[in-house]
Image (cartoon, helix red, strand yellow):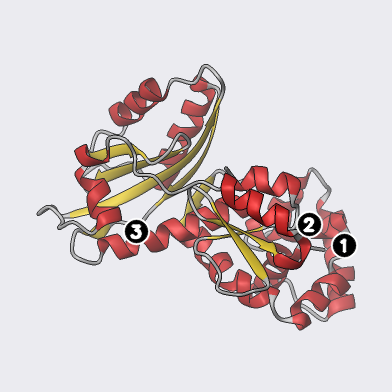
Amino acid sequence: MTFEKIQQIYPNARFSNTPVDDPKFYSIRLEDGFALLLTSSLTKNERSLLQLLSNPIKEPKNAATHRWYRILFKGDSTPNTNQVRILQVKLKGGKDFEKTTWQQAVTEIIQAVADAFWLSQDNFILVENKEIGNFSTSELFSIFQALDSDFDSYSQVFIGEFHKTDGNISQDFQTERQIFLQQAHRNNSQQNFTLANSAVDYFMFEPMQNIPLFKNLFQLWFNDSEMTAILEALWQAQGNVSSAAKTLFLHRNTISYRIDKFQEATGLDLKKMDDLMFCHLLITCFSETK
């Protein structure tokens, strides 16, 4: 059972990397995490049925043949190599999607592959050695976009940082995996993830959602979907009004006028990155629950 299927039936379901020890929530085990449902919203029969349908966590059939699977998930000792980074892919393919051919294409392009394996039908892990000439993150994202086009698939890709192959690598990978899984579930339309573009949202999401002040400010300031879109475009453009206007296909003067009115109403100064980032965090945390 996937989180997306749970969310189709229970729109208020939340994704978590771990079960929650709180009687207010009912945890449903998934392949890559847990779905959290309000206990008060479920009947006794619903709870029993969901527990029957939830997936036990299974090892990949060929796990024993992959040393890096045992290192990352079982805590085996690491090889004497320099550094590695780990690419995680959530992949949706059509009925004719060929996993083996897709994997072969990936490993032929990214030639410094230490290991590659499927965790499940939709989750792929690639461990890449650090060598002279490794692809940049932007080049890697372009490669996966090209593969999506060639294989008629849709991939969400997390490119991890390079890590030393010491005793901490399994723990560091699990942290990267938690960040990726939560961000991918919350941002289905986003395909490219790195630690840098995901960490702030990941660590701020839960604390901000639980503070009424922030929710109240979101409801007060962001009741205009067009202004919300302008602010997000401005954030992506690092505060550059002309770039934001180009992204939204709006005239620069229109953007500037809307920004001035917003600043007048809120007291914020969007030329300051702190203020712009605060808006971004509010939108990220509450736009789905408004």
Of all residues shown, which one is farthest toward the top? 96
Q: Secondary structure at mark 2?
A: helix
- Say which amino acid is labelled 1: Arg
144, above or below 41, in the image: above
Residue linked to disc 2: 230
The quadrant in which residue 78 appears is: bottom left
Position in image of residue 141 (x %, y %): 46, 40
Residue linked to disc 1: 258
Mark 2, residues whose alpha carbon is within 10 Å: few (<14), some, or many (≥20)? many
The quadrant in which residue 262 appears is: bottom right
The front one of 193 and 255 is 193
The front one of 92 and 133 is 92
Rounded to the nearest angstrom, the CA distance separating label 2 from label 1 is: 8 Å
- Say which amino acid is labelled 3: Phe
Residue under the image location 76 percent in, 58 percent down: 43
22, above or below 101, in the image: below
Q: Seen in the image, is 266 located left or right of residue 51?
A: right
Mark 3 or 2, closer to the camera: 3
The label shown at residue 96 is none
Residue under the image location 48 percent in, 36 percent down: 122
59, above or below 258, in the image: above
Residue linked to disc 3: 173
Mark 1 or 3, closer to the camera: 3
Position in image of residue 288 (x %, y %): 75, 58
Residue under the image location 60 percent in, 75 percent down: 22
Position in image of residue 143 (x %, y %): 43, 33
Q: Secondary structure at mark 3?
A: helix
Mark 2 or 1, closer to the camera: 2
